[in-house]
Image (tube, rainbow, N blue to C red):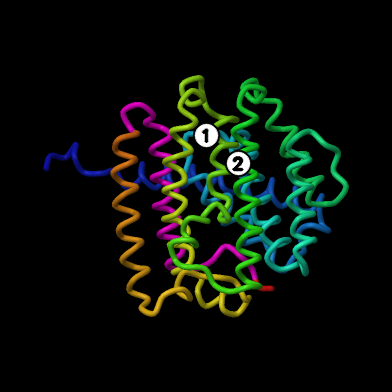
Amino acid sequence: MTGADVPDPVAAAAEQGRICALAAKGQRDLARCAAGHAELFPGRPFDATLFSSIALAMAFSAPWCTADELALTNRAVLWGFAVDWQVDHLAQSRSEVDRIVKTCLTVVDGGVPDDPLGRFLAELRDDLAATPAYAELRGSWRDAMERTLDAMAREWEWKQAGRPTLADYLANADNLAATVVNVAHWIHTGDAGTHRALPRLVAVSDEVQRALRLVNDLGTHRRDREWGDLNALMLVDDPAEIERRLAEQVDHCRRLLADLAPACPRQADFLARQLGFTSGFYRLTDFWGAQ
């Protein structure tokens, strides 16, 4: 190895510092956003660390973006946490879940919101609609939104009526709200080539989302038991099966991302970094604050 091959620790740390600065700007924006919707984001479990963790995840997934570009993506993630909280922990009946789903889809379709969750989503919709490509690609975001909401409603039913099989649970990974965020991100920040490739990107994102579902569950099984949430580990007799399924899914994602990279290098890198960041993050902590 020559001297030129040795990584420069100062340059490496400087780049990490720059990414953390993107996250710091993102955290402050999320904090301001939550303060403007205080009814929707109570301090428990929507604490400052949740905002920081969201901003870090997006900054490390797309470090080439500006803070302004990431602001919409960060808010889309925060919306995912908000609707998850509403469905999983506040809704007391299927009719309440159906109301949440209907409200969100009505807002996406241009309707006037009538509750805090809808008002927050309407702000996100209006920001995304300012993107020139939105008129053409709105249907892709709408489809991803409907899949996400349907998946959350399905999991609510499972919690009331009985546990699903592991296969059904993984097929319902849209409840994680990862792909719906990615679609908004690509519409907002992508170029024409990204927009043309959106169906393929969604297909690969869905596979990464399944891996993220297992990564999440391995890291949060104790909290899920305490909160009464479903978790893949609750659906098998041997926890090693989840580790094995995760390894298989990650290998599958690596192959898909390698195939995607020649045509869509930045988008493949985004998904790979998303999977890598989340895998490291959940080894030590969780996004949610205490109830």
x and y percent of residue 100 in the render? 76, 54
In whole angstroms, how far apart are the C-alphas of marks 2 and 1?
Answer: 11 Å
Q: Which residue is drawn at 44% across and 69% down?
A: 218
User: Is label 2 in contact with label 1 (beta carbons under 8 Å)?
Assistant: yes
Q: Residue 74 versus residue 173: which sits nearer the camera? A: 173
Instruction: Examine the image and state in which quarter residue 268 appears.
Output: top left
x and y percent of residue 136 in the render? 62, 22
- Report the span colored magenta: 261-289
Residue flagged by tag 2: what amino acid is it?
Thr
x and y percent of residue 17 in the render? 47, 47
Which residue position holds label 1?
A: 65
The quadrant of the rendering that contains the N terminus is top left
Which residue position holds label 2?
A: 73
285 inside magenta stretch: yes
Q: Residue 206 versus residue 78: which sits nearer the camera? A: 206
64 inside magenta stretch: no
Q: Which residue is drawn at 39% across and 47% down?
A: 13
